Image: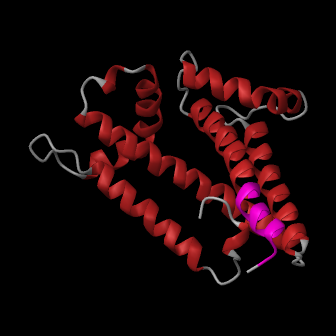
Amino acid sequence: MGTPLTNVAAFIIPTIFGAFMAIVLMRFLMQYVRASFANPFGQFILSASNPVILPLRKIIPSIGTLDTASLLIAFVTHSAFIVVLAFFTRQNINVSQIILWSAVGVCTMMLTIFMGVIIMSVISSWLPDFRHQPIMRTIEQLAAPILSPFRKLIPDMGGIDLSPMLAFLLMQCITVFLRSLPVLNRTFILGF
């Protein structure tokens, strides 16, 4: 148990850095799948990330549909999170730990976003009125590349789509694997 300041920092720091990293990664993923930004959610993602991403794009161009500037910002955001948290918790870390933990942190945050997208996609399939909301088009566009390989593997089961369960199970297995790596300190990884 730490000091009151350390406890507050341990709550606020991951929340702020994690929220910004999620916004930047959502932008990366939406651009990768060519999802529409022409809805309130897409406009929020753009307006929240433009001040940081647009200047960096002048230096680091996209590679095809990969928005390298967004990915770099996510990595740098996670690295900054590690440095700030290490300062508040008075832990010594080295550059190789920051690089490794940041790479794993970006991956786990993407997995967390994908799992959330799958859950929202499944729930919206049960609620027909909700399915027509503008954000659901974006959710479906984000879920399609994840679920389509599983839909090819699993035959139609009388109108019940089991591909979200299989995709979610695989992503959960990857997350468990990453969590069990002995070189990681879970305190310093967002998305765990």
Q: Is residue 40 magenta?
A: no
Q: Quadrant of the C terminus?
A: bottom right
Q: Nearer the viewer, residue 144 or 105?
A: 105
Locate residue 6 relative to residue 190 in the image: left or right.
Answer: right
Locate residue 58 relative to residue 68 in the image: left or right.
Answer: right
Label count reads: 0
**Residue 153 placement (x, y as % from top left):** 27, 52
**Residue at the limit of the structure toward the left, as seen here:** 158
Going 82% across and 58% down the picture, which residue do you hit?
A: 79
Looking at the rendering, the stretch of residues picked out in magenta corresponds to 2-13
**Residue 6 placement (x, y as % from top left):** 81, 69
Q: Main secondary structure of the magenta part?
A: helix
**Residue 121 placement (x, y as % from top left):** 36, 38
Q: Quadrant of residue 168?
A: bottom left
Going 76% across and 62% down the picture, which residue do you hit?
A: 8
Locate residue 45 relative to residue 52 in the image: left or right.
Answer: left
Going 71% across and 76% down the picture, which residue do you hit?
A: 185
Q: Nearer the viewer, residue 66 or 80?
A: 80
**Residue at the limit of the structure toward the top, as seen here:** 38
Residue 185's place in the image compared with 157, above or below, is below
**Residue 106 placement (x, y as % from top left):** 67, 55
Q: Quadrant of residue 65?
A: top right
